[in-house]
Amino acid sequence: MTLKGCERVGSSVSATCGVEGSASRGRSVEGLSESIIEKVKRHPCYSEEAHHFFARMHVAVAPACNIQCKYCNRKYDCMNESRPGVTSELLTPEEATQKVLAVGSVIRNTTVVGIAGPGDPLANPRQTFRTFELIRQAAPDMKLCLSTNGLALPDHVDTIRELGIDHVTITINAVDPEVGQHIYRYVTWQGKLLTGIEAARLLLERQMEGMRELVKAGILIKVNSVLIPGLNDVHMADISAEVRKRGAFLHNIMPLIIADGSDFQKEGRRAALPEDVAAAQERSGAGDRLMRHCRQCRADAVGLLGEDLSGEFTKEKFRQMSAQYDPEQRKKLHMELDRRIERMSAARRAAAANLRISRTDEFLPFRVAVSTSGGNKVNLHFGHTKEFQIYEVSPTGLKFLTARKVGNYCSGIETCGEGEGRIDEIARMIADCRYVLCTRIGPGPKSALEEMGIQVVTGYGPVEQELFRLADLHAQDQVGIEA
Ligand SMILES: C[S@@+](CC[C@H](N)C(=O)[O-])C[C@H]1O[C@@H](n2cnc3c(N)ncnc32)[C@H](O)[C@@H]1O
Ligand code: SF4
Ligand code: SF4
């Protein structure tokens, strides 16, 4: 088994995950109550800082759905495709528990088990809650998380609370049924099939009722909204304001992916581009309550956000593993990672203050696309990069903006694998960046990027350290002649 990254059994945390000297601003836990800090500090989706170190896994136990979103197609399965709704195999609750023990023994920094489909967890309540029940018994240190469209939510809040599921994500794409009616083909409700504005209105009512009950129960809510150009893009600020007003802790604006065979593909809609997401995030007014690092994971995702180890834990493989799930060992590692995050945050604050003092106004903000496989390091060859982490360097410090996947979506077997090396696609995804920071790059892609006004800087090591080195080269106009 080839397991890369920083927190695997047998690998040294300090040798591979250095963050000392880092200086960036992430969504910080400052200003939150102790109980919320406890809930979010090791949850990679709720804390930008945690996501460099702590992993999550999804168990695909929920195939059915009670609505049909026009962007969703769960029929298509490809190991190379990484988008929501995709899974290679369904699990029973017992198999899911066995998989959690296998993953939690090997990837000990896995702290969260989520159910996010491939359909809707609450349209499959028996499988979903049985799975959580078994995991709660077998691996009590795992945080439990689920992701739902919200239609059935009000019926299950008590069970969610009783099982200790502290995190619920609701997908809300409209807070106005006039908009929602164009997003959902149908909603099934009490044996009836509703369409149009009636379907959108019912879904919205149930989502709002579910939110109200979750807030009362003290459960943290994240709202996902799929950004659909020409449909709900101008509506996104209203969604954001409304869900935050009603108690959502985070708002995650996710770009529409055109899934093969989906209604939106047939309608000829286009995917949301990075600039669409950036504009919607800007207009949302959500500030620190925006989730910027979502990777739109598969329903069977495993590993750090952005790395996909699902193929290493197929049914065939995890059934043969003899899991050594050791909560004490795991706890030791988690506490070590907590300390690393604390040191990283302190270093980020200190370095941001330094930048403020040492830079002048001519030091304009610029963006950098960083090649990384996770662990907060520049550690990838440009050609092997499946996602770039986008940072902004400005006189006030370093800011993680978002992560952008490249060459990772496919629309059929015939195009499978062609994603690699598609320089035009990559350049389009990072067109707003002035620099690419990677370990190495071939001469062809380098000059293609340069022709498009994107300069390449090579380096290796902690992201913040390398960004500061780049900031110095930039300030001295030395990029291109660095060693
Ligand atoms: C597959 S769903 C599973 C959970 C649940 N059924 C729901 O919709 O919230 C997980 C997330 O992926 C999103 N999603 C599904 N297909 C998508 C697509 N083609 N583009 C962008 N987001 C998508 C959903 O809206 C949801 O937020
Ligand atoms: S609710 Fe989730 S699973 Fe159901 S159709 Fe929509 S995105 Fe797909
Ligand atoms: S889809 Fe987004 S929120 Fe869900 S596990 Fe992946 S990164 Fe976290």
Image: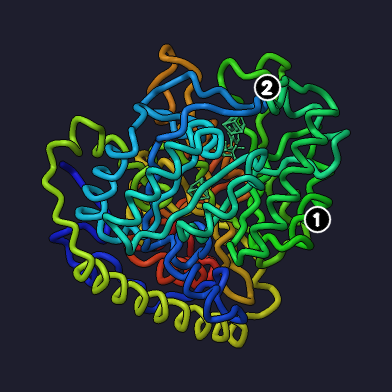
The tally of labels here is 2
Q: Position of residue 89 (x, y in %)?
A: 34, 27
From the image, which quarter does the N terminus lie in?
top left
Instruction: Answer left or right for 115 relative to 277.
Output: left
Q: CA distance from mark 2 to mark 1?
A: 30 Å
Could you tell me if residue 377 is visible in this image? no
Dot 1: within a 10 Å radius of its alpha carbon, few (fewer than 14), some, or many (20 or more) residues? some
Q: Quadrant of residue 127?
A: top left
Q: Which residue is mark 1?
A: 242
Q: Nearer the viewer, residue 173 or 168?
A: 168
Q: Could you say where residue 50 lies in the image, as x and y percent from the top left?
A: 44, 66
Element marked by disc 1: helix
- Tag 2: amino acid: Gly
User: Pointer 2: residues within 10 angstroms few (<14), some, or many (20+)?
Assistant: few
Is residue 186 or residue 480 the one in the foreground? 186
412 with respect to 265 (left or right): left
Q: Is residue 473 left or right of residue 375?
A: right
Colouring: rainbow
Say which amino acid is labelled 1.
Glu
Q: Residue at x 51, y 63 (%)?
A: 48
- Residue at 24% in and 74% down: 332
Callout in the foreground (2, 1): 2
Q: Is mark 1 within 8 Å of ligand 1?
A: no
Please identify the quarter of the rendering in which residue 315 is found. Answer: top left
Q: Position of residue 141 (x, y in %)?
A: 33, 64
In the rendered view, tell whether residue 45 sits above or below residue 50: above
**Residue 364 circle label:** none
Q: On the picture, is 289 further left or further right than 238?
A: left
Residue at numbered disc 2: 191
For image coordinates 30% across by 61% down, the residue present is: 109
